[in-house]
Structure formats: structure tokens, C-alpha cells
Amino acid sequence: MKFRSAYFTTLAAVKENKFIARFLFTTDQRGKIVRNNIVYSFLFKILGTLLSLFLVPLTLGYLNPTKYGVWLTLSAVISWITIFDVGLGSGLRNKLAEAFAKDDKIKARTYVSTTYAILGIITCLVYVLFLVFDYFIDWALLLNVNPELSDEVNSLTHLVFIFFLFRLVSGLITSILTADQRLAAVGFLELLTNFFSVLAIILLPYFFNNSLLWVGASMSFITFFVPVVASLYYFNSRYKFFSPAFTHVNFKFFRDLMNLSFDFFVLSISTIIIYFSQNLIISHLFGPAEVSTFNIAYKYFFYIIVIHVLILNPMIPASTEAYYKSDLGWIKKILQKLIYLWIVIVVIIVIMVLMSEIVYKLWIGEQIFIPLQISLSMGAYVIIFTWYCTFVYLINGIGKIKLQLYVLLIASFFIIPISIFFVKRLNFGVDGVIMAGLICTIPGSIIMPIQLNKLLNNKAKGIWNK
């Protein structure tokens, strides 16, 4: 009852603001679905953000800046295994959205069953490969960790990798929910993950003291456990008809899925290298303690990206439906509103930079010092990145991602050399790694708006229409 009351209170407050009302409240059914997803998702995200903010000082207090940096870097590196779904999650999302739009339930179940089967096989093969490489890799050396932590880090790596592999398969439920335009449900799962993570950090000191291994193990288990429970729930209720079954596995659909999936796979690799390699680069060049410095600033500004993506996520399946129904006018209207939203984001970022020193002190105290230059660079990066995402999310929904693939692929080749050049040649320090990410995002932020404009005006030809 409290949640419903909060929802309707939020809804009423939003309606009172004419600008927001025009932005969120539309008379068409697709607009209503997008609106409901955004409102519910905001409620879940606000709660999740509060929990996530609380988690940072809790974890820092339980561990220390160095161990916390090790965990951040290791979890970022291990999360790279998401690329091994070869884009099947994104391919499933788009194909399911198309099947839902055409009300083709048989094909929808075949897509679901086949994707689970293929990803299950891939997961087993990846684990075998990991065992081979793990024998030769000293993770402590790679992460530039104190030799005293070597055994703990190597043991943790193996454990975390296993849970992330399981998460690879169980996480497909989020692709199904997204295709069904139930982004609020995805937000609720993220909220549960944050809640159990905070609970774990609160309870750990009563059983284990300053244990990097148990922090990693508990966090990794939670990220796997929540989507497993969600899958069991949905496949026995709302998605019972679409639940995966061996009888509906059809590997002939693999090519159909991979037409988009391979492109999404390459996009995933490029995106991970560009946007998620910073922790590894910083840890290797400066040590794990500096990862904590970078990550605190990143988290501070990252919540703007989270809120922005929260609004953009419902646009993917909605734009897919609109495109297949030739309703390009709807996408144009949404794009105009998203550009207004980006202008608001720019203003908020400027305010955040000016207030950053005060916020850091209130948030984490004196444990870590964050230089103003890092906040300035991070703020500029978020401004460019959110502009880029404004167009990319609509393009992803339309499915014309070949040009984006090439742009990110080229950028991924330059991100590490540029980072090293800024750090070692120009002595920019950690700030140089952020600037490298900013520079590699600029080409896409110029090209993607041009492509979407061509697509929405039926002028896209050649690479612009692939």
C-alpha cells in the first residue's frame, strides 16, 4: 500500500509540472507504457541509488582503499565475460520485441529456448578456457597487488568467475523483460541486488574481519542469485508460455539471432574496452588504491548516467515497435524531448562539479581525497557520453548498428595507447585515463546524431542504413 501511495503521489506531482507532463504523458498506448516504466523505474532507482551510495563507505570501512580498489578492478575485469554471450542477450531482446509486436508466441518461445541452449553451451566452453588461462595468469601481478594478497586474489578470481558465468545465463531474464517493455521490473531486480549487497556488508564483520575473499564471494553470489529467483518466478507465471524447453530449441534460429547478435557482440567488446577498462589501466599503472579515487568520482557522476539510461531503456523496445510499424513521427517527437532532457543534464553536471568537494566530504569523509581536476574531467565525460547515448539508444532499437560498431571498434584500438600516452608522456595521472575515454567518445557523439537524422528522414543509404 505504501508503494502504491508513493507511486500515485509521484504521478500527481509530475502532472502538475506542465513541461514534465508533456514529456511523459501521452495519449498513445506506446507512450503510456514508456511513461509507466519511467515513473516506476525512477522510484526503484532512487531507492537503489541510496543503497548503492551507502554501500561505498560501508565497503571502504570494512576493507581499506587498497583492497576496495582490488575488488573494483577485479569485478570490472571479470564482468568482461559478458561479451561471451556473443550478443545473444541483445539479439534476443530485439527479436523478442519484434515477435511481441507481431504477436507470434511460437516464434517467441523458440527464440527464448534456443538462446538459453546456445548460451549454456558457450558458458561451459568458456569455463574450460578459463581453467587453461588461469593456470598461466598471476592475477595479483596483473592487478599490481601486494604479494601478501596474492593467494586471496587468485582464489577470489576463480570464485567470482564461476558466479559471473552463471549470471551470464540467468541474466537473460532481463532481456526478456526489456523486450516486453517491463523495464520497471528490471529496475526492481537491481534494487533487490543493491539491498542484499548492503545487507551482506553489514553482516560480514560479525563473521569475517577485513576479508576481500568474502566480500567478492558474497557480492558475486547475489548478482547471480537474484536473476535466478526472478527467472523461476516469471517462467512459472507471466512467461509460462515462453519458458525455455528442449522441445523448442531450434538451432536453425541461431543464424536469425546472430544476424544482430554478432554485431552486438562486437559492440560489447568495443564498449567494454572503451568504457570499462579504466579500472584495470589505473590499477596496473598506479596501483589499486588509485582505483578507489577514480571510482568514487565515477560513482558520483555515474548516477546521472544511471538516471539518463533509466529514461532511455524503455525507448529501445518502444522504438523497435514504432520502426516496424513505420511510425517514425513518434520517434522524432521522443528524440526532441530527449534533447531537452540532455540540456537539463548539462546544467546539473555543472552544479555537481561546483559542489563536488563538499559532497565527497559528506559522503566518504577524509578517507580518500578527490582532486577537482578529476571531477572536471569526469563531468565533461558524462556530458559527452549522455549526448552520445541519446541517439545510440534509439538507433539500437531500430537495429541499424553497423556504423556504431565500426566507430566503437576503431575507438577501442586507441583507448589504451591514448591513456598510456597521457599518463606516461604528459604526466596527467589518473585524469589522463578519463580524458582518453572522453576523446574516444567524441567521434561517436558526432556521427550517431547524423545517422539517426538520416534514418528518421528516410535518407539513410549504404553504411548509414545497416
Image (cartoon, helix red, strand yellow):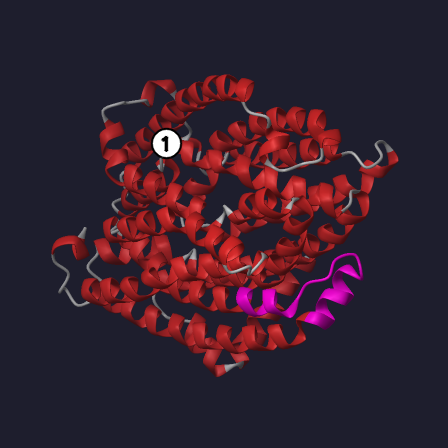
- Give me the residue at 34% from left, 31% from top: 109
- Give me the residue at 59% from left, 39% from top: 75
- Whether 366 is among the magenta residues is yes
- Whether 184 is among the magenta residues is no
317 lies left or right of 144: left
84 lies left or right of 41: left
The stretch in magenta equals 357-378
Question: Which quarter of the picture shows residue 139?
Answer: top right
Residue 136 appears anywhere in the view: yes
- Give me the residue at 54% from left, 81% from top: 16
**Residue 203: % across, % down:** 82, 39
**Residue 189: % across, % down:** 58, 45
The N terminus - image quarter? bottom right
Callout 1: SS: helix
Our reading of the magenta stretch's main secondary structure is helix
**Residue 194: % across, % down:** 66, 47
Residue 236 appears anywhere in the view: no
Q: Is residue 382 above or below residue 258?
A: below
Q: 353 and 325: which one is in front? A: 353
Q: Is residue 247 above or below residue 25?
A: above
- Residue under numbered circle 1: 112
What's the residue type where badge 1 is placed? Val
Question: Which quarter of the picture shows residue 374?
Answer: bottom right
Q: 52 and 62: which one is in front? A: 62
- Give me the residue at 62% from left, 53% from top: 295
- Looking at the rendered structure, the number of numbered marks drawn on it comes to 1
Q: 32 and 153: which one is in front? A: 153
**Residue 122: % across, % down:** 40, 23
